[in-house]
């Protein structure tokens, strides 16, 4: 999970980024809007890289640099070349979750932490074939309204093929000023579809809630952002004040976000001290996250709705509630994003996002590339009927 962002603590800030499943791999948890940032330097435990030299010998890089500036028939800038080297260094580790952000990219990354951004509102990833895919569109976003769906493969942006582009390059092509239009050509199964999407300034509260029939409460979390902790407390109090019979927690198409927000959400159900997740470096447990108090929803029958767009912090929350016997899960298998990234501030406002650990459910399961299989598999109907929500209501009506 950035990804997918953790609250700031002294010299470290952990971020868990949302992602999408199967063989797909999150490279930049860019919601083309909804993102995660703001990290401080974190000294991690030994990673097995202590045999590497403290400094690299850049003589061969300088040799290439001299050859390039002496022979390249085109305009080059110092920043352009330095940023290329920095991007390349992060990419060289072979981990799609480890990435360098220029100051401009970092600024956009951080500004979107509060779910306020200009774009189309879709989280993108890259799969093992280096295709750019859609993890999930943000509910109510231009991308969702235009019909963009999870697992759509973006093959063309404004007439420009995405073949050979990095995820960052595709993101930059899609982003733009509010009010302008971007045309995406996507591959969906055997179909190629053109979508014209009007960019917009989007500010979306991460949590919404309401009452359904039969005195069932409904809470939807769109992403685990900075406002989630406060809003989930409001939602929990609303549920208690309405003496709900049961609660549906909708995490479908939620790409993740701050692990602190996942802990805060879980804490509305779990008793203080109950385990939310473990963080491990190899087989060594480096940190255990526990419920921090609240637990005013503990004992209220709860269903968590998930699907293939539920990732990272969504999976942490679903797993924590399920494994502590506080929730029943309905829907389809989640994405499977079980690694942790750290954001490290670099000079000039740039950032490095680097994988530092894996996380595990309270029952000890590793969900990376596996996802969470619901207690009851319910697929959505092609007719547009929300079968999953109906199944959750029926389950709670019988409690």
Image: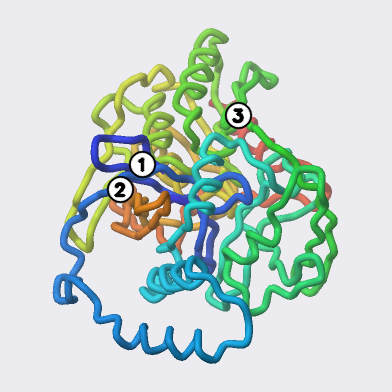
Q: Give the labeled residue for mark 2.
A: 363
Residue 256 appears in the rendering: no
Q: What is the quadrant of residue 247 in the picture?
A: top right
Front-most of 23 and 374? 23
Residue 362 appears in the rendering: yes
Mark 1 element type: helix
Q: CA distance from mark 1 to mark 3?
A: 28 Å
Q: Nearer the viewer, mark 1 or mark 3?
A: 3
- Residue 315 position within the rendered picture, expressed as x and y whole percent measured from the top left: 45, 47
Q: Give the labeled residue for mark 1.
A: 323
Q: Is residue 193 left or right of residue 262?
A: right
Mark 3 element type: loop
Lower position in the chain sequence, tag 3 or tag 2 = 3
- Residue 158 position within the rendered picture, expressed as x and y whole percent measured from the top left: 80, 65
Front-most of 301 and 367? 367
Mark 1: few, some, or many residues within 10 Å (few <14, many ≥20)?
A: some
The residue at 51%/39% (across/down) is: 113
């Amino acid at each position: 999970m950035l990804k997918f962002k953790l609250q700031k603590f002294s010299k470290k800030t952990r971020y868990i980024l949302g992602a999408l499943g199967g063989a797909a791999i999150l490279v930049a948890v860019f919601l083309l809007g909804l993102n995660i940032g703001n990290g401080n330097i974190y000294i991690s435990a030994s990673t097995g890289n202590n045999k590497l030299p403290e400094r690299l010998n850049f003589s061969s890089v300088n040799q290439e640099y001299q050859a390039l500036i002496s022979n390249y028939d085109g305009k080059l800038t110092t920043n352009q070349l330095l940023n290329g080297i920095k991007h390349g260094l992060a990419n060289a580790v072979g981990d799609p979750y480890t990435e360098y952000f220029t100051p401009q990219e970092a600024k956009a990354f951080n500004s979107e932490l509060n779910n306020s951004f200009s774009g189309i509102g879709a989280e993108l990833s890259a799969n093992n074939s280096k295709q750019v895919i859609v993890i999930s569109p943000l509910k109510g976003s231009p991308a969702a309204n235009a019909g963009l769906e999870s697992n759509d493969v973006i093959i063309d942006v404004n007439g420009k093929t995405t073949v050979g582009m990095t995820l960052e390059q595709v993101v930059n092509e899609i982003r733009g000023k509010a009010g302008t239009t971007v045309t995406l050509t996507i591959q969906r199964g055997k179909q190629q579809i053109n979508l014209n999407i009007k960019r917009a300034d989007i500010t979306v509260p991460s949590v919404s809630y309401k009452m359904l029939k039969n005195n069932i409460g409904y809470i939807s979390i769109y992403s685990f952002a900075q406002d989630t902790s406060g809003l989930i407390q409001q939602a929990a109090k609303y549920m208690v004040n309405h003496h709900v019979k049961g609660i549906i927690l909708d995490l479908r198409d939620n790409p993740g976000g701050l692990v602190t927000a996942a802990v805060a959400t879980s804490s509305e159900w779990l008793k203080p001290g109950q385990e939310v997740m473990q963080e491990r470096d190899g087989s060594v447990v480096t940190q255990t996250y526990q419920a921090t108090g609240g637990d005013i929803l503990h004992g209220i029958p709860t269903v968590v709705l998930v699907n293939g767009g539920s990732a990272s912090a969504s999976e942490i929350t679903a797993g924590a509630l399920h494994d502590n016997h506080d929730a029943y899960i309905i829907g389809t298998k989640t994405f499977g994003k079980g690694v942790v990234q750290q954001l490290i501030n670099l000079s000039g406002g740039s950032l490095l996002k680097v994988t530092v650990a894996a996380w595990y459910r309270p029952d000890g399961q590793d969900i990376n590339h596996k996802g969470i299989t619901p207690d009851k598999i319910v697929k959505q109907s092609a007719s547009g009927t929300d079968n999953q929500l109906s199944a959750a209501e029926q389950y709670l009506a019988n409690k």
